[in-house]
Amino acid sequence: MESLKKVAVIGGGIAGAQAASLLKGMDVTIIAGESYLPYYRMRIGEIISGKDPQTLLMHPSSWYEDKGIRIIHGRAERIDASACRIELSDGSSIDYDYAIIATGSEARTLSLPGGRKESFVLRSADDAISLRRALSSADSFAVIGGGLLGLELAMEAAQSFSIPVSVVESAEHLLPRQLDRDSAAAVQAYLQGKGVEVLTSAETSSADDSFVYLKDGRRIPAAVLAFSVGVIPSKDIAEKSGIKSGKGIIVDHHLMTSAPRVYAAGDAVELDGRTFGLALHAREMGTAAAKAVMGEEVEYIPSEPSALLKIGGMDVASFGTIDGEMRVEADGNRRRTLFIRDGIVKGAVLINDKAGMMAVKEMIGKPF
């Protein structure tokens, strides 16, 4: 009887877990890279409020056992493509017939003068645990960067700890890639009503162990400081393995890397000069990579970007391109903004409009 093809998935984020879940009739191993089973990384802010990381798991251990998926809680260091072997950090190795690199991304930080001894990022469950521990004895908290995770983090901290919480954003308004100015103003007002001070057009100059100092002379209380200033594709394993990379691990539209039988998916990828940082694209690429490994014809075309943000009791959704003539409907705390160009709906921003989300999403790319 012919043995099953071995597929090694490097990374336990959305792209890796999605790929592993779809691989049929194959011997699948996930090299998770963390001590946890694959979990929803976009929810790690909930750990700040006291949730156990186990509540964020995508699936229980029994799910992987039932599907015959092996989990290795170790780190892949290098791929020997000529021998079809992956070397792990503990000195062991595993063989593969196909490999999918889904190593995700790493949090960016800023190097600030001023002698601050410690700062945090929020990219993993362990990051969130360390941050929660620091906040439990702090008298103030500042987040540099008003991105999706940064805003969720600030809100979780404000709701869980009775301390001043600030968000320092260099752009003119929050989430400039996802929101128009007026929608961003509504989000900012909501945050400030919940105890999160938001400073926009604010550039940091230095930080010590008590404050963040801005270039305009202001100082922000920051006994604890976290950065939420974007991510960098995790491409180290490709670079160590001689696999072509640029900003990320370079793939074609079949998600194939420069190494034979090695694919890549998710935040770690660079496709047509573009990198990705949304769960939507990670899930799509995980699906496409699994299909390619199984021999299906695949040509991956990224969907139009979308982002969902839940800040306390406020739901925010952004679809498509936030540019064009604006059509606004507002009713109390519900707001819907469509962006029209040449008679076509190019994008939309919804605030507290979950009921209309699917209908609006289907309007994108169609005549208004």
Image: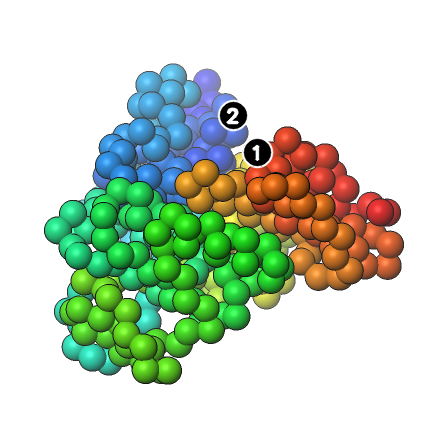
Q: Residue furthest left?
A: 137
- What's the amino acid at mark 2? Lys
At horizontal 54% and vertical 53% (from top left) the residue drawn is: 186
Task: Identify the residue at image location x=16%, y=47%.
Answer: 136
**Residue at x 35% of width, y 65% of height:** 144
Q: Which mark is residue 24?
A: 2
The crowd level at tag 1 (other Cα within 10 Å; few <14, some 14-19, many 20+) is: some
Tell me whether circle 1 and circle 2 mark residues in contact (CB < 8 Å).
yes
Residue 301 position within the rendered picture, expressed as x and y whole percent measured from the top left: 67, 49
* Residue at the image position 24 percent from the left and 74 percent from the top: 207
Q: Which mark is residue 294?
A: 1
Cα separation, mark 1 vs mark 2, equals 8 Å
Secondary structure state at the residue bearing disc 1: loop
Instruction: Please indicate whether residue 345 sits to the left or right of residue 85 in the image.
Output: right
Among numbered discs 1 and 2, the one appearing first in the sequence: 2
Q: Position of residue 69 (x, y in %)?
A: 38, 27
| Badge count | 2
Q: Which mark is residue 70?
A: none
